[in-house]
Amino acid sequence: MENSFGNNISFRSFVPVFQKQPFLYLFIFQAFGIIVGNLFYNLQFIYLLITSCVLLFLIYLNTQFILKKISLYLGLALMFFFLGYLTIFLFQKNAYQIESIETTESFQIKIIEFQPRKEGWSKGIGEIRILNDSKTAGKKERIVFYCKTEGNFDVNDILLVNSELVPIENKNNPGEFNMELFWSTKGIRKMCFFDENSSKLLDRNERTLFQNFIFNIQKSFNQILEKHLKGENLAIAKAIVLGDKSMLDTEIKNSFSATGAMHVLAVSGLHIGLILQILMEFAKFFSRFISRKTAVFSILILLWIYSILTGFSPSVIRSIFMFSVLVLSEFYGKKQNNMNSLFFSAFVLLLFEPMFLYDIGFQLSYLAMVGIYTLYKPIEKWYQPKNKILKYFWQGTAVGFAAQFMTVPLTLYYFHQFPNYFAIANLGLMVISGLVLGLGIALFVLHYIPFVGKLTGFLLLISIAAMLWFIQWVEHLPGAVAYGFNLPFILVPILSAITFLLVKLSPSQLVWKLLALSFCFSLLVIVYERWNSLTNNHICILNNNKLAFIIKSGNIAYCFYNDDSKNLDKLKFTTESYLKCYPGKIVYKSIKNKSVHFQIDKIKIGILKDEADFIFRLNNRKFRIIHSNERKSTNSENLIYMPWFENDYSLRNGSRMLEF
């Protein structure tokens, strides 16, 4: 029986043109609503949306056929826009309950996540339960904390902490990771630091039966890996198989990042897809004993169990839910649409966690899947080898190209670098990473069989060693990484759209030729901006707790810092990010209790210590860096304040760039 609305016109006649993949379009309006809600946090806007929906519904009931369809489409668009706006509003209302704490307060923290370290600061996520301030008593909010104590804390512990809650803010130095956005996607905007003198264990709550069950399994799996692997091999195995990256050192991370293979070290879409494929192939051996339906549901249950064992991280949840929707839609749908299923999963995820939209992993994983679904077949047709082995490798390469074409603009924007040999790296890792993951899972099952367990562990060791050797070989190829990309955000969607259309359309079409011309122009803009970053001469005064600035001339960057050389490691993290935007060789020089005079070509630079302040001379220009007390000046533009001052000329607002 068909539903109808007036004039005996069936409801099906109003089904949109996009009926095959409606969630692709509706997701856009939902995402737009989330963005607007995050930028303009104003409840009154909701009433405007409700009024608009009511008006459109009245138009729908009292107009002709064409206007009915238009009003229906607009109504759907507004409804999903309103839904996105409402979800981000409720998220902010529930996540950020404590408005401000400007002084040191005593409060209780219940530990939710904890990553203990033997040395240095341990990191955790906690939930504030009680505050002494009467205005905030009874309210809850998640924070990130860093602690340095001799005692061992655990999940569910209740701590009494006497510390200051400070907002998580970006320093806005060149190339800096957006820490504020990263934590806000998890509903966290404050942090605190405490040691043994400012904290006390109040209560140690026992884990629930479920938590204890998961903890014991994770502990058992870790012990199995530790029995067969050591050092960097163990660190890589834990990252790939269990999603535990705590043992990875900077050198390993840099090697994978330089080859465009950082995604291999995070349990996400790649790993879930590989596990799904391995389990599907394994299930074929039992096709006589179990039905396809039983096999599909059993595999999905195993995937969700695996997500729990890897810590139930957002990236794992996203990936497993996405693949679950895709597998089930393929199983039940005779003419299922992959793009519709993909964006349905995105819609549901944003319905519960709207800040996922701002998560880099979410953006990259969905863009990669869009590329695979839409560009793989056209790319695969570029080359048709007759050899089966060659065809297999080309198909894997085509998948990598399809994903990379859609994600490159975004990675250039976020990370300012491009791995020139990504195709080689991904082609090799396609085989090796699947082998490492398969052997890692097999080791957990076969460990208890004496000879077979040792053989599996040995093969896993060889596979990881081969992976590390291959990654480092690619990393040391000439010109492995190109740095210095400072892409304006507007170019990201433009480049993605142009690339997509260039692959999909025929080169014989006039539109394709115009797009190719636009693409070449965009590349020229990017190359020019990169050349400017490489050759630009400037002075960058960093937003740092101790005065530090970089003088860049050509491909050499001189970093001067007002501190002891033993504390240089803290500064290197900032300068490494800077070098991604302005690549070159860096030289460090301490200016503690020193005056410095420097000349580059015809530019004379001088740094003089004047009591507690610093005077910065750039030829005839003079800047005073206010370090501890404010000074009177006739020209406020020539004053630069250290970040603990709050004014328009403070480094708190971001680094200061002076060109010469």
Image (cartoon, helix red, strand yellow):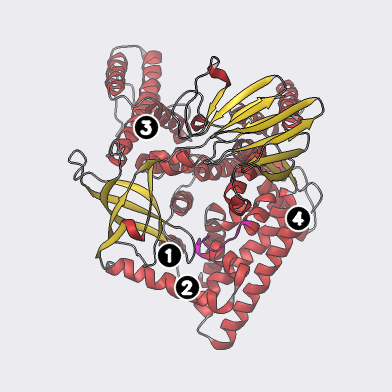
Label 3 environment density (alpha carbons within 10 Å; few <14, some 14–19, many ≥20): many
| Residue 555 visible at all | yes
Q: What residue sits 64% from the left and 78% below the top?
A: 458
* Towards the viewer: 343 or 613: 613
The residue where tag 3 is placed is 84
The residue where tag 2 is placed is 221
Q: Which mark is residue 309?
A: 1
Mark 2 → mark 4, Cα distance in angstroms: 31 Å
Q: Which residues are magenta?
A: 242-250
The image quadrant that residue 54 belongs to is top left
When the figure is inspected, residue 499 is found, relative to residue 114, above or below; the finding is above
**Amino acid marked by disc 1:** Leu
* Towards the viewer: 173 or 531: 173
**In the rendered structure, which disc, 1 or 2, sits on the residue that comes first in sequence?**
2
Q: Quadrant of the C terminus?
A: top right
Asked if the residue at tag 1 contacts the one at tag 3, i.e. Cβ–Cβ closer than 8 Å, the answer is no
* Towards the viewer: 499 or 126: 126
**Amino acid marked by disc 4:** Val
**Amino acid marked by disc 3:** Gly
